[in-house]
Structures are given as C-alpha cells and as structure tokens.
C-alpha cells in the first residue's frame, strides 16, 4: 500500500535526521533539538525570541522546549532576560559560545549533506528538494486541519 510505503520512508528519513549523530559526528556538538533552537536564535540576528515563538516554529511541546532551554542555559549557550516591551515574556538570546557551538554543529551537518549530494548527484537532489518542501508544507496543512 502506497500510504504505508510513504509513512515508512518518511519515518526512516526523520529518524536518520533526528539522530544526534547528525549533529555530533565530531567533537562536543549539540543534540539535534538544541542545534535546532540555536539555529533559530542565530538566524534572528542576535537571537531574541521567546519560548512560545520557538515552540510555534519548531512544533516542540512547551515542556520539552523548557527542558531544551534549561540545558542550553546550563551549558552557557543562551541567556534569558525579561522582555523590554512585555514583562510577562522572557527573551532568549544566543550567547557567543552558543553561536560558535551551533556553527560547528551546522558545519558538520553540511558536510553530511554534501556527502549525500555527492552520492545522489546534484540533479537528483535538485529534483528532490521541491518535492520534500511540498510534502512538508502539505503535512503541515493537513495537521492544522485536524
């Protein structure tokens, strides 16, 4: 059945990607979810987001996000401070050490992506990218309908 094959392939791909080895092939890299959060903060240009915004962007549950943030804070990679515009909110900032650790993890991930491109070929990857993006968008829409 095509639906079973699609689900199996999707789960295989996400299992491989959501594996700490993706971000930890060399040295003390960040676990996947920590790298994901640091990446979002890094792309914010100095990293100023709230936990709620991170939950919405990543679809990570609030309790899980709090554990990720506590771990990043203990490691000295992020800081928290009350929002200047809304004291009920706490802004998260990526510290220089957090940016450096994220960049190293990201560099390692790009090495793995490059190896995949080498093995699949650029033409196949260029064909695959819009299909993956379309599938992700459609899954997002389907989940919002439920």
Image (cartoon, rainbow, N blue to C red):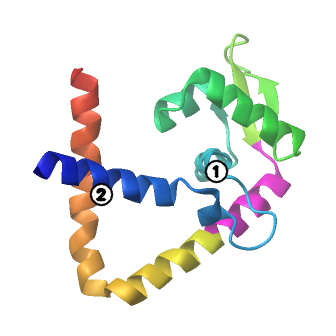
Q: Residue 110 lies in what quarter of the image?
A: bottom right
Residue extending furthest toward the top: 88
Tell me if residue 83 comes above or below residue 141 in the rendering: above
Answer left or right for 108 relative to 18.
right
Q: Which residue is mark 1?
A: 45
Tag 2 secondary structure: helix
**Image mark for residue 9:** 2
Q: Position of residue 43 (x, y in %)?
A: 58, 52
Q: Which residues are magenta?
A: 94-106
Residue 22 magenta? no
Q: Within 10 Å of the Cα at label 1, are there few (<14), some (14-19), or many (20+) other Cα atoms?
A: few
Between disc 2 and disc 1, whose residue precedes? 2
Quarter occupied by the C terminus? top left
Residue located 69% across and 65% down the image: 24
Residue 95 magenta? yes
Q: What secondary structure predominates along the stretch shown in magenta? A: helix
Viewer-proximal residue among 38 and 128: 128
């Amino acid at each position: 059945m095509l639906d079973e094959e699609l689900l199996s392939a999707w789960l295989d791909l996400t299992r491989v990607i959501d594996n700490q080895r993706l971000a930890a092939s060399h040295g003390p890299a960040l676990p996947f979810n920590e790298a994901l959060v640091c990446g979002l903060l890094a792309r914010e240009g100095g990293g100023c987001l709230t936990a709620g915004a991170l939950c919405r962007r990543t679809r990570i549950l609030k309790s899980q996000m709090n554990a990720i943030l506590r771990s990043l804070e203990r490691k000295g990679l992020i800081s928290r401070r009350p929002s200047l515009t809304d004291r009920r909110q706490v802004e998260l900032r990526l510290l220089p050490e957090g940016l450096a650790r994220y960049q190293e993890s990201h560099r390692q991930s790009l090495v793995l992506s490059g190896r995949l491109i080498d093995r699949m070929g650029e033409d196949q990857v260029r064909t695959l990218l819009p299909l993956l993006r379309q599938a992700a968008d459609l899954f997002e829409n389907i989940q919002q309908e439920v």
